[in-house]
Image: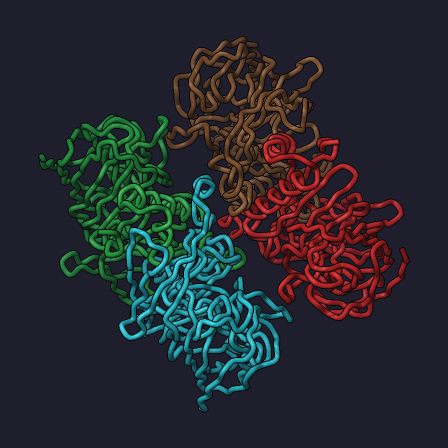
Chain colours: A brown, B red, C cyan, D green
Amino acid sequence: MAIYEFQPEVYYTALGTYEPVLEIADGDTVITTTVDNAGQDASDQRVTPGGNPQTGPFYIADAEPGDTLAVHFDKLWPNRSIGRTSSLIAANALDPYYAAQMPHEHVGAKWELDLEKGTATLIEPKTKLGRFALPLAPMLGCFGVAPPRGQIISTSTSSTHGGNMDYRGFVSGVTAYFPVFVPGALLFMGDGHAVQGDGEIVGTGIEISFDVQFTVQVLKGKKINWPRAENDIYIMTVGNARPLDQALQHATTEMVRWLQEDFGLDALATHILLGQCVEYDVGNVFDPAYTMVCKLKKQFLPA
Amino acid sequence: MAIYEFQPEVYYTALGTYEPVLEIADGDTVITTTVDNAGQDASDQRVTPGGNPQTGPFYIADAEPGDTLAVHFDKLWPNRSIGRTSSLIAANALDPYYAAQMPHEHVGAKWELDLEKGTATLIEPKTKLGRFALPLAPMLGCFGVAPPRGQIISTSTSSTHGGNMDYRGFVSGVTAYFPVFVPGALLFMGDGHAVQGDGEIVGTGIEISFDVQFTVQVLKGKKINWPRAENDIYIMTVGNARPLDQALQHATTEMVRWLQEDFGLDALATHILLGQCVEYDVGNVFDPAYTMVCKLKKQFLPA
Amino acid sequence: MAIYEFQPEVYYTALGTYEPVLEIADGDTVITTTVDNAGQDASDQRVTPGGNPQTGPFYIADAEPGDTLAVHFDKLWPNRSIGRTSSLIAANALDPYYAAQMPHEHVGAKWELDLEKGTATLIEPKTKLGRFALPLAPMLGCFGVAPPRGQIISTSTSSTHGGNMDYRGFVSGVTAYFPVFVPGALLFMGDGHAVQGDGEIVGTGIEISFDVQFTVQVLKGKKINWPRAENDIYIMTVGNARPLDQALQHATTEMVRWLQEDFGLDALATHILLGQCVEYDVGNVFDPAYTMVCKLKKQFLPA
Amino acid sequence: MAIYEFQPEVYYTALGTYEPVLEIADGDTVITTTVDNAGQDASDQRVTPGGNPQTGPFYIADAEPGDTLAVHFDKLWPNRSIGRTSSLIAANALDPYYAAQMPHEHVGAKWELDLEKGTATLIEPKTKLGRFALPLAPMLGCFGVAPPRGQIISTSTSSTHGGNMDYRGFVSGVTAYFPVFVPGALLFMGDGHAVQGDGEIVGTGIEISFDVQFTVQVLKGKKINWPRAENDIYIMTVGNARPLDQALQHATTEMVRWLQEDFGLDALATHILLGQCVEYDVGNVFDPAYTMVCKLKKQFLPA
């Protein structure tokens, strides 16, 4: 159960079987950093080309195809005071005829973070919102493992291996689970957001570099089909696809499987339970694959 | 500002320009009841054919096409102790290949309500869930006004006029807003659920008859395009369509309009605000039109 | 087997249970006219408000709920020389980001028809296309029967009862089949197009008034779920829904049913046959419900 | 303008930047073979694992990112007499509730080809179809170039780089065009079908090994966004995405661009022309990305 401090020197804008930057083992913890979506680090300097560059991949010894990799986020917190957002709702989140009438000069917005107080305050552009302040809710937009079949998949999108899910529920304290497709799993992470709305409808959260601490665990012989997660209150499953309907189908199916495989419920009990207790969160409706999260409160799980 | 006690004798399974059952005025309150989705009343007797039969229509004097009708739900509460749910997740909420393998013998589930304690307890069928109890969260599944263009639209579906939205946020204390398409608006309501999960993925909440008290208000000359709502914490807009993407587009567009028309924000401020603060709830993914709700916390509205 | 000449005096912009304009019987033929989408007749005068106004409803004696109504189009042909189209591809047929950049000043286009030669020639606006001529391929955009459940449904959209399908395969010589939902079936028709592209992506064909001759047949006790059709070469099924995927699912399912019910194929043979021989046509991707047509060449049907 | 005879020894089940198997130049012709979807060759022996294994990649000298690669199919023809199909329509091409009731024992079907007569005859299983014969219409299901951003993308799916489009219009005599994303373009091809229905709704055509002859051309400095193609009668653009609506949007947008960039039409003329003359073909509705093809008859192009 080692603790590593790792300073990244190379970043990838796709998830795949690249040379690992660090080999760790089941139970180990890594303290590291991520750059923002544009490749800018804690000093707001561009250190790598943009496009959600990822820290990693981390090779987790013992992780083999057919296992599950658990990643617990011990800490996810911005490490600088300037964050940036887009200021234009994406055309695909608006009625087509309405999007076609929108003003389309994009103006970058800047936010100043107070990392002590835990706020992000809009400082540019000047609007009627004034110095509008939001509580920080730091989350990782893009992380996951190497995909199956030797694929290398852009950090713009997501699938069964994770990737650019842009779900605002991926915060400190959450444990995420991924199917392992390649030896060592090859874990990547990046694209921190200080704050993000549901759906990432402007195509960004408050984009910023992060300090990250995470701890891995290998669940040997545990097979899952889509990313899963849990926090103190919920178990969650993640579907990544278009349209949203299909993302929801993936997430719901994975939740049905989870309840039947791990909680001793048969199909009848599972359907009755989910029917009245399921919750959904919209991850993103901006990226090439949309993300829908299916949630169930742990209080409703069988003892 | 009269208060009417109204006992329904006729019910409709479509929303349209039918003979009003009661004429009321701006500011009036009505105390009435609704039967459950199957047409069963407070004594669990079938008094009308099933299919989300509606109480109403109520004719609201002064409401003219181009106005908005506000309906405040003073009280929505079950008025009997037995509720029923389906026990089968709909094929369209699951991966197609997986749905094709599901056990498909449907078993109706029964729930016993304790209206004092505010709980619903599963009493049939016997499963590993045992006597599984949920807190009541009573909501109306289907309500709205007569649609435009002389249409009569089934209570199985929904559109700009409301209808079968099956959104679990429509609870006591909420004010819903509808575009007025015909003189008198013609307000309908029914399909009470004691509890419902997001998405109504089994095609039912805990279906039950309700006591309802509501108060209407006519917003003269106020034009809206899709249903809106508010509670103490949120303003909300509702999109009804398939796929979910399109429902989300309608809801987001209506929210953008609302912020620009009523809260003095220009497009730039609106997009920046929603980008980081918007929330979405999945209403239903079962009915012919799906429902997506776009929400913004009132605390983020300009003063 | 009477032949009626019927001159319409009233038109409807929704399909529903209105007072019939003419009662006919199984085997009868009607010679009548339709106005264009804007309510303009053979003399190009507006005789009724626009919105795909329908001639009818025709009450077909003997047609009862659960039967099928066959409508054979003996003749569908424009009856004036001026037709009109939109000149702007709808935002929902283009990439959202691209639609948002399109020039959006709409210019109505005019076409002059030579009904003898069978051509439509673009006469306005002046473009590099010049006097661009197309062969006439006259089709009905909107027709169908009264929908189920007492509904009255706008001629802007379509469903199981037909309606605004805007499929360019509905030409002279085709027989269309509709489920009968109400006594007399109540047949409506209108919205003739002299020419139309697949998908009706500009929201119009060459809109024009028509001479129509049709002959009805009642298939007693024959139950279908979605509109069907046939011509000399194909049998066809029609799905109306959004997204296109769902329209395709409806059409394919109806074709599978047809082959199994009427052509003596079991599921295995049906799937093998359709797998290699099915064809699809895109009806429309403009209206509230999109239309997809599933086709099979008659030469592949079992003897 | 060399002619190469190339016998493949390695196959890839993803498209990406692999070591080229042959370097050719602008104008060169290659005569080669492809194995079937399951990795079986002309002698029906498995020579490589299944999953649409590809012959290639071919490195085309002079092809640089930002260019377009033209691939003319001089010959696409099966090179053995046994082909195989699935016999089960995919759940996602049927109504969800209906798919859930389907018999799901899959039975592989076998077809015997007469390469002289040009027919494929069903020989297994025995059904009421008997020895059902279809005319050969050989096409390539999966081909394309290395994708952008260093990605390696599975041959199960498709995108801007081509891939598993499963469009039955890709036959001998067609010229396909791809954006070049990497030096040398890296052309792959495989997954021949002797016959295929629209949509590939059973997930296969008649799967078979092919003799292939193709000739390449590099269009320097010509930038396209999605695959394009042409034959004697049509120009075509290809969109790959889910849902079908989005695939259609990509294809239509690419066609609008093509008409404006290469045929001297302004937006107004382009929209008027496509509105009445556009055609769509459904490529596939089975793979992770669906394929829609937008077509325009060359006779309607400006001189």
Residue A58: percent from left, percent from top: 47, 17
A257 lies left or right of B69: left
- Residue A72's place in the image compared with B116, above or below, is above
Residue D107: percent from left, percent from top: 37, 55
What residue is at 49 percent from the left and 34 percent from the top? A287
D233 lies left or right of C156: left
B56 lies left or right of A115: right
Q: Residue furthest bottom?
A: C2
Between residues A146 and A285, which one lies in front from this camera angle? A285
Q: Does residue B115 appear in the picture of this structure?
A: yes
> Quarter of the image holding residue B79?
bottom right
What residue is at 28 percent from the left and 56 percent from the top? C130
C147 lies left or right of D81: right
Residue B229: percent from left, percent from top: 73, 46
- Residue D269's place in the image compared with C213, above or below, is above
- Residue A8's place in the image compared with C132, above or below, is above
Between residues C208 and B299, which one lies in front from this camera angle? C208
Residue A232: percent from left, percent from top: 69, 28
